[in-house]
């Protein structure tokens, strides 16, 4: 790597989880791009799973899908939303991937009879994954590497050791270590405490890693005395002790806060690079629209993982982007589909009082599905703007089949193998698959839009590449019957003829997609479907008809 001039910034976390490593890493990426540098970001997770694809959203939050079909940690969503980096499966690394690769090599005899050990074989593979990102694009100025977990966790050690080795190999002029830690305030005393940070840095230094920057998560700005104390006890210069103050309004204000505290300036000075002011005017316009909305919109999200904020993280962010694009204040009403299910035979309107639009997101399994189907029916009957995503499309198709097309007991093969009308069925190549991890239809596929359809008008183009994560599809033998009753199949995949989108011709805004458009929405460039869904919901609130 000595012939390539890419610089590496490692970001670790201490004291406790959920301090915001992902967002602070994405924010630094945005700021570096604002200075004119090209960046990429890697997430290294210490769990044994190959990827989070088989984990429950309650365990790990949403699964974020990259363009090339990798199932990854939700932090990659932040990276892509905040920056212009094009991320692939190379940007998501887990302990499971590393050990799986090394063990496969050992089974093939590639280590020539040597004893396979954590050092050097595991750490060499970790370093290889880092360098592979640079070899794929040698024009990168920076690669940011976020190491998941907390310093002191036993499973993180190989990644931290690899980080130490990279610094030793390339030197301080090419490598920087940033440690995000916690400076809590004891409520009763009203006093900030530095001891947790001191202990965390001690853990890091015991394995030979000395942080260059301490990013201190704190409820309020660190005083000069506190910064001096942390500097003294943690062997970091005063200037490099940076406050990462809690943001109560929006995570999208974090880049400005870190810039004002000279985070990007300190980073660039470390590498001897120009640190003139970052230029990110579009970001400023976006945050201004969040602070100064001219209208309001209430959107109901009907799902079964509602209790966990991160389960639908990209979706919530995409709704916010769409609202900002309409200069509107977004209010999300989270509705548990299991609660609707209990009242499916009665009046469910109480769940949707005061809403302007209704969204049913993706998911798997039978829990709460009848509640989602009922929600799709409520939106159809009441002319409420409806946006279905993946399973949200399946629910709309099932409801329409049962109540409009006369297909009694229509259902999806996922839930009812014996349904007389399997309007949703498994993809042809999914019937024989038994392994769960990484075996779905994943990544970007082309969607060609039908002439005269609402969705083509929204996109303003003939086709678009969208990301997928599913095993089931609309059953084509029912297509003619559905079209006869007013359903429009506005988007299809040209290679497989799979249905990608549906819409209703006699409804103000009733659109569902097999793909996940939320994965391609950005703050400064909201996805057209989310932007138009919010627009239609605002119009519905005002009584305006398309």
Image (cartoon, helix red, strand yellow):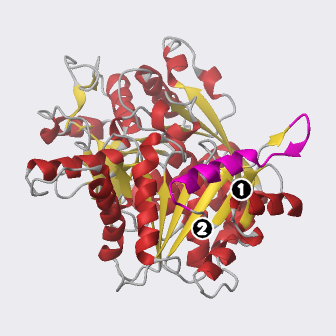
First of labels 1, 2 by sequence position: 2
Q: Which residue is mark 1?
A: 216
Report helix, strand or loop for mark 2: helix
Q: Is residue 236 above or below residue 180?
A: below
> In the depicted view, which residue is nearer to us: 336 or 400?
336
Give the side of residue 85 with respect to residue 354, left or right.
left
- Residue 541: x percent and y percent? 68, 43
Q: Is residue 133 above or below residue 269?
A: above
- Residue shown at the point (38%, 31%) measured from the top left: 395
Magenta run includes residue 193 = yes
Rounded to the nearest angstrom, the CA distance separating label 1 from label 2 is: 15 Å
Q: Is residue 309 above or below residue 528?
A: above
Q: Is residue 66 visible?
A: yes
Give the side of residue 299 with respect to residue 234, left or right.
left
- Residue 27: x percent and y percent? 61, 64
> In the depicted view, which residue is nearer to us: 21 or 392?
21
Quarter where residue 353 is shown: top right
Q: Residues within 10 Å of mark 2 (few under 14, many from 20)?
A: many
Magenta run includes residue 180 = no
| Res. 275 mark | none
Q: Which residue is mark 2?
A: 28
> In the depicted view, which residue is nearer to us: 279 or 183?
183
State the extent of the magenta-drawn residues as a range. Answer: 187-209
Q: Is residue 501 visible?
A: no
- Residue shown at the point (41%, 31%) measured from the top left: 56
Quarter where residue 373 is shown: top left
- Residue shown at the point (61%, 79%) measured from the top left: 270
The N terminus: image quadrant: bottom left
Q: Residues within 10 Å of mark 1 (few under 14, many from 20)?
A: many
Report helix, strand or loop for mark 1: strand
- Residue 403: x percent and y percent? 37, 23
């Amino acid at each position: 790597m000595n012939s390539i001039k890419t610089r590496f910034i490692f970001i670790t976390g201490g004291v406790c989880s959920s301090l915001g490593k992902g967002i602070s890493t994405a924010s630094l990426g945005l700021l570096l791009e604002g200075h004119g540098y090209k960046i990429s970001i890697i997430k290294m997770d210490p769990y044994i799973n190959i990827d989070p694809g088989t984990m429950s959203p309650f365990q790990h939050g949403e699964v974020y899908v990259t363009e090339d079909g990798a199932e990854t940690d939700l932090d990659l969503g932040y990276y892509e939303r905040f920056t212009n980096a094009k991320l692939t499966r190379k940007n998501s690394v887990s302990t499971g991937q590393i050990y799986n690769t090394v063990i496969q090599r050992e089974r093939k005899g590639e280590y020539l009879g040597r004893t396979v050990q954590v050092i050097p074989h595991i750490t060499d593979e970790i370093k290889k994954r880092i360098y592979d990102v640079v070899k794929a694009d040698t024009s990168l100025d920076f690669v940011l590497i976020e190491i998941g977990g907390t310093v002191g966790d036993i499973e993180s050690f190989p990644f931290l050791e690899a980080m130490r080795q990279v610094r030793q190999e390339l030197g301080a002029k090419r490598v920087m270590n940033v440690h995000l830690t916690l400076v809590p305030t004891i409520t009763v005393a009203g006093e900030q405490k530095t001891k947790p940070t001191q202990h965390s840095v001690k853990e890091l230094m015991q394995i030979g890693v000395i942080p260059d920057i301490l990013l201190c998560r704190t409820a309020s700005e660190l005083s000069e005395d506190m910064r001096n104390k942390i500097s003294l006890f943690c062997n970091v210069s005063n200037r490099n002790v940076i406050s990462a103050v809690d943001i109560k309004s929006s995570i999208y204000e974090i880049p400005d806060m870190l810039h004002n505290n000279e985070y990007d300036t300190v980073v660039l000075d470390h590498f001897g690079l120009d640190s003139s002011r970052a230029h990110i005017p579009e970001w400023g316009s976006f945050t201004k629209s969040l602070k100064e909305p001219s209208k309001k919109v209430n959107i109901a999200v009907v799902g079964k993982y509602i209790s966990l904020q991160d389960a639908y993280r990209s979706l919530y962010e995409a709704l916010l982007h769409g609202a900002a694009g309409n200069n509107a204040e977004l209010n999300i009403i989270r509705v548990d589909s299991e609660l609707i299910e209990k009242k499916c035979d009665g009046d469910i309107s109480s769940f949707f009082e005061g809403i302007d639009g209704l969204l049913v997101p993706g998911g798997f399994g039978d829990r709460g599905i009848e509640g989602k189907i009922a929600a799709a029916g409520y939106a159809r009957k009441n002319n409420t703007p409806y946006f279905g995503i993946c399973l949200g499309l399946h629910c709309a198709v099932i409801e329409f089949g049962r109540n409009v097309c006369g297909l009694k007991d229509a259902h999806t093969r996922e839930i009812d193998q014996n349904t007389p009308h399997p309007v949703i069925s498994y993809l042809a190549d999914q019937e024989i698959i038994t392994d769960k991890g990484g075996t779905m239809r994943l990544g970007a596929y082309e969607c060609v839009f039908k002439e005269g359809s609402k969705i083509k008008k929204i996109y303003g183009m003939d086709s678009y590449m969208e990301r997928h994560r599913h095993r089931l599809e609309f059953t084509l033998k029912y297509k003619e019957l559905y079209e006869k009753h007013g359903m429009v199949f506005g988007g299809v995949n040209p290679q497989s003829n799979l249905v990608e989108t549906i819409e209703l011709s006699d409804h103000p805004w009733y659109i569902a997609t097999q793909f996940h458009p939320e994965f391609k929405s950005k703050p400064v460039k909201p996805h057209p479907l989310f932007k138009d869904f919010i627009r239609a919901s605002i119009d519905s609130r005002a009584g305006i008809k398309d």
